[in-house]
Image (tube, grey):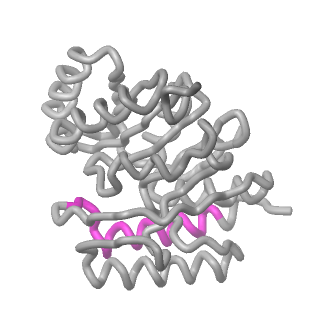
Amino acid sequence: MHKFLIDNLSLVIPTKDDHLRIYENIELLNKYLLNNVGEFEIIIVSNGSSKESIVQLNTLCSKNQNLKHIVLNKSGKGLAIKEGIAKSKFDNLLFSDADCSVSIDEFNKFVNNYKLKSGFVVGNRKNSDSLNLNSPYLRKVSGYLYSRLIKSIFKLDIEDTQCGFKAIDKSVFKDCQNFITEGYSFDLELFLLADKENINITQIPVKYIHNTNSKISIFKDTIKMLKELFVIYRFLKYD
């Protein structure tokens, strides 16, 4: 009889100076994983963080054997996730934002019969069964327009590509690390890679609570993501 929700899990958390948020959430994350996962690791990937943030996270990780801290000099969420995938030791892999805007408890919905529901399980903040709380109006509008653009260009019928809460079974989704963009658009590439390799994508409605101190700039980051869209369109080939 299984004691745990799933046998193993690598939790990857990208961060750029988010050490205070990680300090706030680490106890909850660790407690959940201890109670629900047989073997686990938490991989924190600093990308372009300050020396102070790196020192704080090194101190935190030195006190917990399940924590690992990787430091990248260059910033980029895609870079951080790619490094986390490369250094993870378990096939079951979960990405989560440092602010835990989607609670770790939502992972319960990602699992069935002690394994991930598919090779690629993704949180969906935009489904009618989802709860999307405190998101600014402009962010909702920009997200809607971005989704429409993706559907138009890539013919990808996904409600929410950008939710930071996603899980991958590396034994099934073997090409999950083969994305080329270094910023936020790596999410889109994951969907395109999964679609190309006929990996089943399971969309899970989740409860999302927007962090009012979010560092994402709607204007600057949207421009960056649009540029990355054209990079993806130009360099990736699809059958």
Identify the residue at horizontal 32%, vertical 70% (top origin).
220
Residue farthest to the front, as pictured: 1
| Image coords of residue 191 (percent x, y) | 64, 59
Q: How many marks?
A: 0
Membership of 217 in magenta stretch: yes
In front of the other: 100 or 207: 207
Location of residue 222 with respect to 118 vertically, above or below:
below
Q: Is residue 94 left or right of residue 67?
A: right
Q: Is residue 172 left or right of residue 97?
A: right
Identify the residue at horizontal 42%, vertical 71% (top origin).
130
| Image coords of residue 58 (percent x, y) | 22, 22
Location of residue 98 with respect to 66 vertically, above or below:
below
Q: Is residue 40 left or right of residue 89?
A: left
| Image coords of residue 19 (percent x, y) | 19, 38
Membership of 136 in magenta stretch: no
Location of residue 80 with respect to 61 vertically, above or below:
below
Identify the residue at horizontal 30%, vertical 37% (top origin).
29
**Dominant secondary structure, magenta:** helix
Q: Give the quarter of the figure containing the N terminus.
A: top right
Q: Give the quarter of the figure containing the C terminus.
A: bottom right
Could one spot residue 159 in this view of the protein?
Answer: yes
Identify the residue at horizontal 53%, vertical 54% (top origin).
186
Q: Which residues are magenta?
A: 214-232
